[in-house]
């Protein structure tokens, strides 16, 4: 139980609890350590908690809505295979700096596979079947690469003022390349939506080109396929400060699962956090790590309301949706071997089952495919029965490979958007949000602090972003608790 700090806090809580209709029995502080409640046990919440713990702030309580830690890093059993419904790749490997998640993956000896997209030109299918000629597909890929280089150059030449930002689509127009044929749209979808899960029309040029993940950590991406799951990186961090039993399960009483936070009351002297099951917890500070999608709903009621600058910043950012559909078949009817892992399907409807991955390397003999959809297609698919999605996919596969192919025996369609604890998959930086407003998303409000991938200074949307954001947000809180430096240091507008 998190203890109260001093009498003043007790008095404040007493008043609040009368309002809540609860009678509080007065307790006294057992020590002078300021206490912290962390909402959410995904990568960022666990990383923040560890950072606090390392700084000697061990009087913490982690409240997690689901029955597990890991959040958006979540393995599941799919027809006997351990697959990732959420994050799958360590992105940003092989560069001048080392991605901290890559270090953890190496440490854990996680099974990872380099993703090689170099041979897409030989693996791009027409809407009605058959491959495009290599030269035709290569020309489309080259044209997209040129437009990307142009856009990156343009982005670097723009000043950081919001009124100078443009969408990725506007940059494409300026480079005289607006993809409009099925193959150009498939290649464009691969280059943009497959990474950001929103179309070029939406995405900010300035804040995604160049992308710090790839410029700092390297261009390589590694697909995690390990029975322990990608989530073992979260367990790896958690076990460095939470007690475990001899079966390596976390038994620390400071982690409480199945605790859905519904209300956060904050005042100058402390915070009161109320969960759906009627429990009430008190602390000096709270660190909220839920996704920006969750923050844009009323799942958590802040009392008093968060200030309007905070709400305006939070509600302008985007929570995108990226759906990884796994399928299993009685036998393989697709090419295997080097340079065949990834293939594209070019349809007149942009983003219609465009990106395919055959998983023979990762799951040999399993006859498994992964197809990715995003954004509006994800919303549509989440609302229909999986049988309807499977029928659509079978039609696409028959168009690509012919009518003789076998029916899929299993399908997995993760539904992140409909889930009230996530409301999507990862943040994407939309046009119209300046760096100044982005920093306001991270800024604390009194004793309420924020973390999560969407608060990462350079790496929003990624596992490493969540990890580093947890450290940064915790350090801001530590500065306040230990050095009384409690004011958020926002850079002046337009710098
Ligand atoms: C489908 C998908 C694919 C992705 N692919 C990649 C990838 O390949 N590579 C990569 O680097 N990143 C990828 N990401 C992004 C990456 O997973 C996230 O950036 C990261 O895991 C987010 O961690 P977080 O701690 O910020 O948030 P979360 O993991 O969302 O953690 C927040 C926690 O808060 C809990 N919570 C929510 N509401 C409440 C409440 N009211 N009370 C208590 N607890 C609450 C949630 O259950 C959750 O556990 C992907 C994500 C998804 C979903
Ligand atoms: C982008 O900038 C680089 C370096 O300044 C230059 O060599 C290249 O030609 C530019 N490319 C485009 C497409 O503008
Ligand atoms: C620890 O391990 C031993 C033997 O493996 C077992 O008998 C015991 O019950 C375990 N204790 C706990 C607390 O899990
Ligand atoms: C596939 O590529 C690997 C690594 O580049 C190589 O060692 C192997 O010989 C290749 N296999 C075939 C069948 O070409
Ligand atoms: C590229 O893909 C084609 C078609 O699947 C395949 O035949 C070829 O071996 C691949 N080339 C390389 C270099 O891997």
Image (cartoon, rainbow, N blue to C red):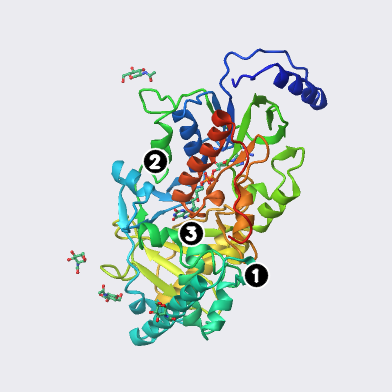
Residue 258, image quadrant: top right
Label 2 vs 3, first from the N-terminus: 2
Q: Are marks 2 and 1 in contact (CB under 8 Å)?
A: no
Label 3 vs 1, first from the N-terminus: 1
> Could you say where residue 485 lies in the image, as x and y percent from the top left?
59, 35
Query: Is 331 left or right of 176, judged from the image as shown?
Result: left
Residue 312, image quadrant: bottom right
Secondary element under disc 2, as helix, strand or loop, is: helix
Image height of 6 relative to 133, above or below: above
Image height of 457 relative to 211, above or below: above
Mark 3, residue position? 325
Secondary element under disc 1, as helix, strand or loop, is: helix
- Distance (Cα) linking label 3 and label 1: 38 Å
> Could you say where residue 98 lies in the image, as x and y percent from the top left?
34, 51
Look at the numbered disc 3 and say if its residue's Cβ is closer than 8 Å to ligand 1.
no
- Distance (Cα) linking label 2 and label 3: 22 Å
Mark 2, residue position? 232
Look at the numbered disc 2 and say if its residue's Cβ is closer than 8 Å to ligand 1.
no
Q: Are marks 3 and 1 in contact (CB under 8 Å)?
A: no
Query: Is 130 left or right of 177, judged from the image as shown?
Result: left
> Could you say where residue 471 lies in the image, as x and y percent from the top left?
48, 40
> What is the crowding at mark 2: few (fewer than 14 residues within 10 Å), some, or many (at least 20)?
many
Mark 1, residue position? 163
Q: Residue at x 26, y 68 (%)?
A: 338
């Amino acid at each position: 139980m998190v203890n109260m700090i001093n009498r003043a806090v007790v008095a404040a809580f007493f008043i609040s609890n009368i309002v809540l209709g609860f009678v509080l029995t007065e307790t006294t502080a057992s020590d002078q350590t300021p206490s912290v409640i962390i909402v959410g046990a995904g990568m960022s919440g666990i990383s923040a908690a560890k950072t606090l713990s390392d700084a000697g702030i061990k009087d913490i309580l982690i409240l997690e809505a689901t029955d597990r830690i890991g959040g958006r890093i979540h393995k599941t059993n799919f027809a006997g295979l351990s697959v990732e419904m959420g994050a799958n790749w360590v992105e940003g490997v092989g560069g001048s700096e080392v991605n901290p998640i890559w270090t953890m993956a190496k440490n854990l000896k996680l099974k990872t596979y380099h993703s090689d997209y170099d041979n897409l030109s030989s693996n791009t299918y027409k809407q009605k079947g058959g491959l495009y000629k290599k030269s035709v597909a290569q020309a489309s890929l080259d044209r997209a690469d040129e437009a990307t280089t142009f856009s990156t150059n343009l982005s670097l030449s723009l000043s950081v003022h919001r009124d100078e930002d443009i969408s990725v689509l506007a940059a494409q127009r300026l480079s005289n390349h607006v993809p409009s044929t099925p193959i150009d749209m498939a290649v464009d979808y691969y280059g943009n939506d497959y990474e950001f899960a929103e179309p070029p029309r939406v995405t900010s040029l300035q804040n995604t080109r160049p992308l710090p993940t790839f410029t700092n950590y390297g261009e390589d991406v590694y697909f995690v396929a390990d029975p322990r799951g990608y989530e073992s990186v979260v367990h790896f961090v958690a076990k460095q400060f939470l007690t475990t039993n001899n079966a390596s399960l976390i038994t620390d009483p400071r982690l409480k699962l199945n605790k859905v936070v519904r209300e956060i009351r904050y005042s100058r002297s402390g915070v009161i956090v109320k969960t759906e099951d009627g429990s009430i917890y008190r602390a000096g500070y709270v660190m909220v790590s839920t996704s920006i999608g969750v923050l844009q709903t009323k799942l958590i009621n802040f009392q008093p309301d968060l200030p309007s600058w905070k709400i305006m910043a939070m509600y302008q950012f985007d929570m995108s949706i990226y759906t990884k559909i796994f399928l299993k078949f009685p036998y393989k009817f697709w090419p295997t071997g080097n340079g065949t892992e990834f293939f594209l399907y070019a349809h007149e409807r942009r983003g219609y089952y465009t990106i395919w991955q055959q998983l023979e390397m990762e799951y040999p003999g399993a006859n498994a495919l992964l197809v990715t959809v995003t954004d509006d297609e994800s919303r549509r698919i989440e609302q229909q029965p999986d049988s309807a999605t499977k029928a659509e996919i079978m039609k696409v596969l028959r168009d690509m490979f012919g009518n003789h192919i076998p029916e899929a025996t299993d399908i997995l369609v993760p539904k992140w958007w409909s889930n009230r604890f996530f409301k999507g998959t990862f943040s994407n930086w939309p046009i119209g949000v300046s760096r100044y407003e982005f920093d306001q998303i991270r800024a604390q409000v009194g004793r309420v602090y924020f973390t999560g991938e969407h608060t990462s200074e350079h790496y929003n949307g990624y596992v490493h972003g969540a990890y580093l954001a947890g450290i940064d947000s915790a350090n801001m809180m530590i500065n306040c608790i230990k050095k009384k430096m409690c004011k958020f240091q926002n850079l002046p507008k337009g710098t």
